[in-house]
């Protein structure tokens, strides 16, 4: 077996451990402390923000326009509507500002 | 017998409801799967190895980082550690998702964690928050198309890597941030949403500029979560619900 193959296997095991790890640790406690629950409730917004903020900061006007329009649409419309609106603005704006 | 038929058709419609919700994810991740396959071959992976990596790891950002380091001939243990670091945010998702799917049989739970990605977790969490149960059929409908397309497109990208047109003009490199912003906005009714988002944004940007990628994800996430933990529980609305 090649080194590449073993890197993939080890990477897959490490990744699966992150996917079950949080549950295996938390499930050891019978009742969850309110502060822990508050922390868990904050997880989606906290993690997803880190996938947007640095990318937005290092982007340009076309990307910013797309994000602003997508955010506005998301106040009223669903996820698909905001995504398509953002993508449309991005493609259009990039024709002009690159 | 009659109830069997009813619950089976209920599960089937749950499954297709999940499939519908998976479509934006399939569209947004397609370019990255193709790109991953192309880059993988470019960095010395075979088509089979690119396919295996997508099928077994199933985590776009970590695969990109792994391939990049592999191309730079970095030590294997460091490549694996980097993949682990990029995927470390899943630990937080896993702790949250565990509260929603603990009623599933163990084998289904094991499979459920395997296909858990950023959007998978966020959409399931949003469903749980709206008071609906997160069933296995619905969850599988949401995750399976993403997985199948991801793996197949990775292999296609590896085979036809050089054929991808101008990705910049098509906006492909910025589709995922737009999608993730939509997911962030979806949680805006939660208590402490704005302070958490502000803390995570500030911490991740500072970490991105100083420590560098991929650590900004874990550091930013921990900042937001810590804020929610430290503030008195009545701010987080935890005590309000039974």
Image (tube, coloured by chain):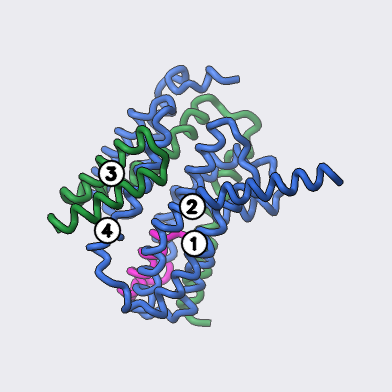
Q: Are marks 4 and 2 in contact (CB under 8 Å)?
A: no
Question: Disc 1 versus disc 4: distance between alpha carbons?
Answer: 23 Å
Q: Earlier in the sequence, mark 1 or mark 4?
A: 1
Quadrant position of residue B46:
bottom left
Q: Are marks 3 and 2 in contact (CB under 8 Å)?
A: no
Question: Disc 4 versus disc 2: distance between alpha carbons?
Answer: 22 Å
Q: Which residue is mark 3?
A: A53
Question: Disc 3 versus disc 2: distance between alpha carbons?
Answer: 19 Å
Any idea which chain is the blue one in this picture?
Answer: B
Q: Are marks 4 and 2 on the same chain?
A: yes
Q: Residue B130: x percent and y percent? A: 54, 31
Q: Which residue is mark 2?
A: B117
Q: Are marks 1 and 4 on the same chain?
A: yes
In terms of secondary structure, where does tag 1 sit?
loop
Which label was assigned to residue B58? 1
Q: Colour of chain A?
A: green
Residues in magenta? B58-78
Q: Earlier in the sequence, mark 1 or mark 2?
A: 1
Q: Which residue is mark 4?
A: B171
For the C terminus of chain A, the quadrant is: bottom left
Q: Residues within 10 Å of mark 2 (few under 14, many from 20)?
A: many
Q: Residue A68: x percent and y percent? A: 25, 40
């Amino acid at each position: 077996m090649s080194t590449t193959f073993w890197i993939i296997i080890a990477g897959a095991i490490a990744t699966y451990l992150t996917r079950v790890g949080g549950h295996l640790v938390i499930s050891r406690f019978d009742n969850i402390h309110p502060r822990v629950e508050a922390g868990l409730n904050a997880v989606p917004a906290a993690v997803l923000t880190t996938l947007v903020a640095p990318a937005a900061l290092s982007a340009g006007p076309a990307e910013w326009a797309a994000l602003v329009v997508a955010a506005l649409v998301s106040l009223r419309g669903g996820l698909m509507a905001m995504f398509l609106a953002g993508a449309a603005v991005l493609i259009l704006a990039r024709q002009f500002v690159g | 017998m009659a109830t069997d038929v009813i619950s089976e058709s209920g599960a089937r419609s749950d499954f297709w409801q999940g499939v519908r919700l998976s479509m934006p994810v399939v569209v947004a991740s397609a370019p990255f799967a193709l790109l991953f396959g192309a880059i993988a071959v470019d960095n010395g992976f075979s088509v089979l190895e690119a396919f295996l990596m997508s099928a077994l790891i199933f985590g776009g950002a970590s695969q990109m980082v792994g391939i990049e380091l592999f191309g730079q001939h970095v030590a294997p243990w460091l490549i694996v550690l980097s993949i682990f670091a990029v995927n470390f945010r899943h630990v937080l998702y896993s702790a949250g998702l565990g509260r929603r799917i603990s009623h599933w049989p163990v084998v289904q739970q094991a499979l459920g964690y395997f296909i858990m990605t950023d959007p998978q977790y966020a959409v399931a969490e949003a469903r749980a928050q709206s008071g609906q149960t997160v069933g296995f059929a619905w969850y599988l409908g949401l995750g399976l198309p993403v997985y199948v397309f991801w793996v197949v497109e990775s292999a296609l990208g590896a085979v036809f890597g050089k054929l991808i047109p101008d990705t910049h003009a098509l906006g492909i490199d910025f589709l995922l941030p737009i999608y993730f912003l939509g997911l962030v906005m979806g949680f805006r009714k939660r208590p402490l949403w704005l302070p958490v988002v502000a803390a995570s944004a500030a911490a991740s940007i500072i970490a991105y500029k100083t420590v560098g990628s991929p650590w900004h994800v874990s550091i930013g996430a921990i900042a937001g979560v810590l804020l929610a933990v430290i503030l008195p529980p009545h701010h987080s609305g935890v005590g309000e619900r039974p």
